[in-house]
Image (cartoon, helix red, strand yellow):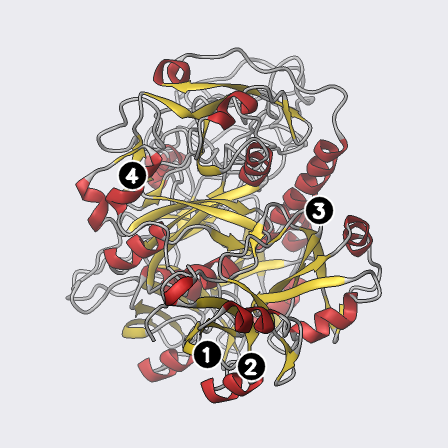
Amino acid sequence: MAAPPPADGGSTGFYVYVGNVPKTASEDQLRRFFGECRGIVAFSFRLEDCTYCPTKIAFIKFANRDDQERAYGLNQQFFQGKRVFVASVDSEANFTPKFSVMVKNLNEYITEEDIYEHFKHIGTIECVQKPANNYGYVSFDRCESTQRALILKNRNLKGVDIEIQQVRRNICILLEKPTGPQFGSIREKCEELGLRYEPESESETKLLVTNIPRQVQEADILEYFGRFGKIVDWQMQKSVISVLTNSACVTYSDAKTARRVFLGEPHFFQGVCLDVYNPRITYGELQSTTAVLLKRTNVFLTNDEIYQAMNECGRVSYIHRVDSTRFCTIVRFRFAIAVSQAMRLKQIAGENVSVVRYTEPNYLTDTAPIPEAFPKSGVRMQKEEVLRRLIEQEERVELSRLQTVPNEAYANPDGKFYRNEVQIMNYPIGTTLGQFRDYFRKHGTVINLREFIQGDCIGVAIVSFDTRLEARRACSMNQNFMNGKRLLLHMADEKLFLDPELCVGVMGLTTATTDEHIYDRFSEIGAVKFVLRETSGRAVVCMEHRRWLDAAMRIILVGKCRVQVSRLFVGPGPGNPNVPNNQFPPRQNGPQPPPQGNGWMPGSQGVMPRPNMMPRGPAPRQVVPSRPNLRQVEIMHGNVRPPLLGQGPPMRPQFGNNGPMMGPNGPPMMQGPMGPGPMMQGGPRMMGPNGPPMMQGGPMCPNGPPMMGPNGPPMRQGGPMRPNGPGPMMQGGPGPMMQGGPMRPPGPMG
């Protein structure tokens, strides 16, 4: 039904908002619930077809104020087993940080009433709302009740271990307003907020999303944005401007959906407000009487904390925080009177801030680093502890992540029939297209299949998906079973990186030895990342940690088959153009399907030379994260070593051809802004003006890479070798020599 007009009283009537209405409730049933209010003249439901929200809402129009007041009296009364929420459509009621908590890890079987019963002994509850199946809000009448809820020991709710967190900013209790979005068009929003309008923004399908809590599961945020329309691509990485958050690029199938998301702010999600930017639009004012500038914004501050502090000075209408070069944040108020009060702020959430009036010269003028608050506030210490735990969790996940590098040999034989392809290995030979469709049904739509068979038992299947997002989600099924076979799969335009410090070659296998026999045998000594069966007699086993490699080398039996296990020696390949081909033993390639007439030429696996003559100190092992912004040119040409474990280049919110390029080499945005804009070229190596030092690839890692100098770790025999020519003579005996003799240029000598 059409949305009702705003409640303005008089002849047009008076509207009320009714929340937490069961999806199955009909209009007649709800009318009977409001039977004492006889002046109902209009009625409409919202969110009836929304699968994201477990309930729906209603807007009811009354003819007079008396009936409207009687309707308010039914607030918190039960209707079909649910406690409905009745309020004015103009209500400013919010779930606030002082009086509210967020409850996570819920499921579709936990209702608002279950949440109410779980928390009612803590204090008087004003409102319970479950905007999605997996989280909800609880509002108390006293802030002391909020603190007791945060330290609640009983975290078991109907067999589920719930997580209780503080709400980070004011969250509107009304799930929707009757008037719809605040702005009717992109041009109107730009004129109202001082943004520079570009006609190209109307056809843009990509959006930049910031202020995503770093601990949020990717599937949850995808579910939220998927409610607006079909998502064809999604890329999320750690943010460099706020270390406790992530940023993402979401691509919709059509520009109309992207415009609706961009205009549909605010986007409240799990206790925060997500900020959505159109990459074609930048902040356009040269000076403003209603905006202030936070210079060198501390990376431990979140957008929600900035909003809450500034909102106490005056009504905030817009926050622009995407600059990873100067770390400036623009805050725009509705009224100019708030600017003078905001400029008096010296701290936000325990962090020192510098607030000045916004002008373009102020934005472009460099500012000296702002001193850190000393001693550190309790909020800052709590954030650092949370960040340490997050990094530990991410590193554990990174151990099991499949490492890939771009596959230059990949070629799509026909874009009309094949797209968004996933390469699958170790699958049951003879699996049909229909079987693959059934297997990946929850992750996407399989539209086509190519298959290459090598010998009797080795095959490579190339499966096409409708969108790239679906293909990436299908890759999350890596190492899952399909008819007793443990799948090994990745994007077809990428190839495996067989790390010599993690992988071993297994020779002497027979057709009677299955992949699971190999997996089970090596799992006895440590966690196995994957088993790649290259031929019936040879396989590559990748362990999750290099400390298990020596034990793996001592394995001589797999089942009843006697095998030979050796380190992975590989040839120079494309990663080492400066090394002659005769300097290394032969390469061990991955599965090579026979040449086909469709032009698809699969490349060898991304095997890099084993640095068997480098000192092996306490440095963490090296991996290549499967990220779209890998420094593949340097890695594949041997100019740099792969990034360290659990790290990636710092994220910068810039848009390239494939989404936001968040590293220091990300391409600048087309038609760069005149003055402050969201995409700034370059970026410091530090995480913010006074933030923690950046290592290669990630914010706030506890220790940087070992230095090979006087302050680095002790060297082992042989000393560090340079890539071209003999390295400096280090204390200790001579290191091993490579094939070709110690005096040849590429053969380093200890």
Given the image, on which type of amino acid does mark 2 rest?
A: Phe
- Label 1 Cα neighbours within 10 Å, binned few <14 / some 14-19 / many ≥20: some
> Where is mark 3, residue-wise?
98
Tell me, yes or no, whether the two marked residues, 2 and 4, touch with CB atoms within 8 Å: no
> Where is mark 1, residue-wise?
40
The residue shown at (33%, 65%) is 230
> Where is mark 4, residue-wise?
190
The mark that comes first in sequence, 3 or 2, is: 2
The mark that comes first in sequence, 1 or 2, is: 2
Whole-angstrom CA distance, mark 1 to mark 2, is 9 Å
In the image, taking residue 324 as reference, residue 699 lies left or right, namely: right
Q: Please say if 69 is above or below 664.
A: below
Nearer-the-camera pick, 361 or 301: 361
Whole-angstrom CA distance, mark 2 to mark 4, is 42 Å
Whole-angstrom CA distance, mark 3 to mark 4, is 33 Å
Tell me, yes or no, whether the two marked residues, 3 and 4, touch with CB atoms within 8 Å: no
Nearer-the-camera pick, 256 or 384: 256
> Where is mark 2, residue-wise?
34
Question: Is residue 558 visible in the rendered structure shown here?
Answer: no
Tell me, yes or no, whether the two marked residues, 3 and 1, touch with CB atoms within 8 Å: no
The mark that comes first in sequence, 3 or 1, is: 1
The mark that comes first in sequence, 1 or 4, is: 1
The mark that comes first in sequence, 2 or 4, is: 2
Given the image, on which type of amino acid does mark 3 rest?
A: Lys
Whole-angstrom CA distance, mark 3 to mark 1, is 37 Å
The residue shown at (27%, 52%) is 205
Q: Secondary structure at mark 4?
A: helix
